[in-house]
Amino acid sequence: MSGFLEDAYGARTQEAVNAHYDRWAESYDAEVAENGYATPRRCAEALARHLPDRAAPILDYGCGTGLSGAAFRAAGFTAIDGADVSEGMLAQARVRGAHRTLHHVSPEAPFEGIDVRSYAAVACVGVIGAGAAPFTLFDDVLAAMGSGALFVLSLNDHSLADPEARARLDSLAPSPHTLLEAEDGEHLPGIGLRSRVVVIRRG
Ligand SMILES: C[S@@+](CC[C@H](N)C(=O)[O-])C[C@H]1O[C@@H](n2cnc3c(N)ncnc32)[C@H](O)[C@@H]1O
């Protein structure tokens, strides 16, 4: 293994996360493909099990270079908008063309210019936890979504080891939200990393 992946999961500030992904943008697709990146397909298939309307609008939050958008397309979804904090990653997503619209967002105003309530589903594929967005993004997304909308997200082994992740998942049981599924499976088999794909219906 070489490149940026081995340095992807360290603790760092959001500023350092942005710089890391800006530098990684050009080689990201090749490096994660080499390691069998499975989570985008797993998230798209999980969402498809609960959202039969393939024309329903999806917000792919933390869309990166567009691999998650391409996976939602491959599952049949046709109206996918993307958002990310890294201009470098967004530039690659523009070239890929899997998204209808792409938004550059800032962690301080995560949904500025985005009508989150208009989406049938919000996705955070490989976005929340170790080395990327803070766990508070989980709370922010759920708060911003419309009632009845779906939230599909993945948490890799590093993120799941953090009590902050477990607290969020445990808090769902007594909340107005419904945990529709949580399935463990391959994330990056090339480096032996797994992830949990979770689908939540917002109350
Ligand atoms: C591992 S990549 C996943 C990208 C894409 N979803 C995929 O599956 O390939 C993590 C992405 O999260 C973005 N990110 C990190 N912190 C973020 C934040 N606070 N808000 C939105 N996106 C963020 C990074 O810029 C990066 O593009």
Image: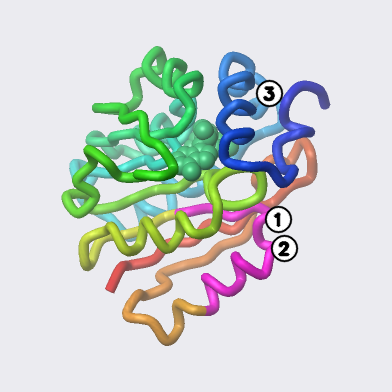
Q: Nearer the viewer, mark 2 or mark 1?
A: 2
Q: Secondary structure at mark 2?
A: loop
Quadrant of the image containing the C terminus: bottom left
| Quadrant, the N terminus | top right
Question: Gap in Å between the C-alphas at discs 2 and 3?
Answer: 24 Å
Residue at the spot of label 2: 161
Stretch in magenta: 153-170
Is label 3 in a helix, a strand or a loop? helix
Q: Residue at x 74, y 43 (%)?
A: 10
Q: Residue at x 45, y 83 (%)?
A: 173
Amino acid at dot 3: Glu
Amino acid carrying label 1: it is Asp
Q: Position of residue 77 (x, y in %)?
A: 28, 39
Q: Is residue 163 magenta?
A: yes
Identify the disc placed on residue 31: 3
Three-letter code for the amino acid on which mark 2 is drawn = Ala
What percent of the width, then of the height, locates residue 93? 42, 21
Q: 9 or 154, which is in the foreground?
A: 9
Q: How is the image coloured?
A: rainbow
Taken as a whole, is the magenta stretch helix, strand or loop? helix
Query: In 3D space, how far apart are the residues under numbered discs 1 and 3 (Cα atoms)?
Result: 19 Å
How many other residues sit within 10 Å of disc 2, few (<14), some (14-19) or many (≥20)? few
Q: Residue at x 35, y 25 (%)?
A: 98
- Tell me: 130 left or right of 15: right
